[in-house]
Image (tube, helix red, strand yellow):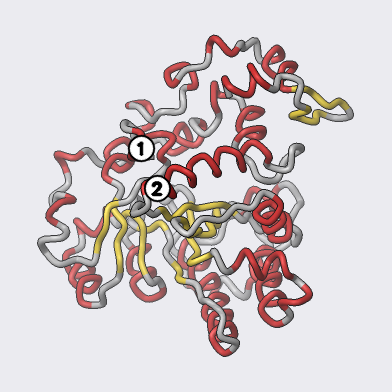
């Protein structure tokens, strides 16, 4: 941000209504100068205020608490067509290429709001030449149906599923008609599903939920409902792609970070691997089943310590997960929040 403010202050950065603001005008509107920019003043590090407060944690995505800066610098689909995010991504990938033996698996979001999301993301990858032999990508699907339903963007849950998967089926069946998405999918290795697991969900019989076309409520579908329909669509898509000799995708959602232990039972049945799995410490039977089935667990000790459970209160320390033969690895969740060393970014 500091570099761009000094070198490109007149870049047209943000459209508000009919007016287009330059980067300089955005900073003036926010009463900020380049001299004020530092790791501390950005206020994007998780601290004690975020412990068991996922709402506050989400606000940390906004530098200085301003959504405009997040829109300009951290989005691929914005007025600048993701120019700044592409430059940041290239810097990170160049560092990985230089280290030669260091690889990364990054996440980028598809929200399911409209059918053009995949094309716009693929166009961003293609136009900015986002590729590295050291990087693979996961698609992160935020569970935000209720938000889009209340805004009138979606009418039922099936529309969200169609926006998420129909472009993928089309690009698999007719890759020549969808070359951008076809090229992007060669860099994708899996799908993630994310949201605040600590939000209580009503206990209901799943037979009462009906099909996705029938889910027109403004309430968010439960975790199991999301997971089942993401899994079903991925399974069908993978079968189709495998028949055509194309790469396939795994389902590796966030699970067991907090909330209902049922989430871990759901992912045991549906997922290839999970992220976090903290609640397994409370369920030795499920923990043993995960071990027997070699279901991968990506642990994130720094983010867990800041959000849901302190190091000292984890009954099975992270470094002992290897010792008990769980198929686990350490990962970096939200490195913008938790990075203490450059190498951890």
Q: Secondary structure at mark 1?
A: loop
- The answer to whether one can see residue 146 in this image is yes
Q: Quadrant of residue 344?
A: top left
Q: Quadrant of the N terminus?
A: top right
* Residue located 72% across and 17% down the image: 24
Choose the circle earlier in sequence order: 1 or 2.
1
The furthest residue to the bottom? 243
Q: Residue 52's mark?
A: 1
Count neighbours of disc 1 (C-alpha within 10 A) and say few if under 14, some if 14 to 19, many if 20 or more.
some
Q: Give the image location of residue 254, x and y in percent.
A: 41, 56
Q: Give the image location of residue 97, x and y in percent.
A: 44, 49
Residue matched to label 2 = 198
Q: Quadrant of residue 88?
A: top right
Q: Give the image location of residue 50, x and y in percent.
A: 38, 31
Q: Quadrant of the C terminus?
A: top left
Q: Is 336 located above or below residue 272 in the figure? A: above
Residue 192 horizontal side relative to residue 118, left or right: left
Q: Separation of disc 1 and disc 2 at Cα?
A: 8 Å
Q: Secondary structure at mark 2?
A: loop
The furthest residue to the right? 18
Out of 7 and 177, give the one closest to the viewer.
7
């Amino acid at each position: 941000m500091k570099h761009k403010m000094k070198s490109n202050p007149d870049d047209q950065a943000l459209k508000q209504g009919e007016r287009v603001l330059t980067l300089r005008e955005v900073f003036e509107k926010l009463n900020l100068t380049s001299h004020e920019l530092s790791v501390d003043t950005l206020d994007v590090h998780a601290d004690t205020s975020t412990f068991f407060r996922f709402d506050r944690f989400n606000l940390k995505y906004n530098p200085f608490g301003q959504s405009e800066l997040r829109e300009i610098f951290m989005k691929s689909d914005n007025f600048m067509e993701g120019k700044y995010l592409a430059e940041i991504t290239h810097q990170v990938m160049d560092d990985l290429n230089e280290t030669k033996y260091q690889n990364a698996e990054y996440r980028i979001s598809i929200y399911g709001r409209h059918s053009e999301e995949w094309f716009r993301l693929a166009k961003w990858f293609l136009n900015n030449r986002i590729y590295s032999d050291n990087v693979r990508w996961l698609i992160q699907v935020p569970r935000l149906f209720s938000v889009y339903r209340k805004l009138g963007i979606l009418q039922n849950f099936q529309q969200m599923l169609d926006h998420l998967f129909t472009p993928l089926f089309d690009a698999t069946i007719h890759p020549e008609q969808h070359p951008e998405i076809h090229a992007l999918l060669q860099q994708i290795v899996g799908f993630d599903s994310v949201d605040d697991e600590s939000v209580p969900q009503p206990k209901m019989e799943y037979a009462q939920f009906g099909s996705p076309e029938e889910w027109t409520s403004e309430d968010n579908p439960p975790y199991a409902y999301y997971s089942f329909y993401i899994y079903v669509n991925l399974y069908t898509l993978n079968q189709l792609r495998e028949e055509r000799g194309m790469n396939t995708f795994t389902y590796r959602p966030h699970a067991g970070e907090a909330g209902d232990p049922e989430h871990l039972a759901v992912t045991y049945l549906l997922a290839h691997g999970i992220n976090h799995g903290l609640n397994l410490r409370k369920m030795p039977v499920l923990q043993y089943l995960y071990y027997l089935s070699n279901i991968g667990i990506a642990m994130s000790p720094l983010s867990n310590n800041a959000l849901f459970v302190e190091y000292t209160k984890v009954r099975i320390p992270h470094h002992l997960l290897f010792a008990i033969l769980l198929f686990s690895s350490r990962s970096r969740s939200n490195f913008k929040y938790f990075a203490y060393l450059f190498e951890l970014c």
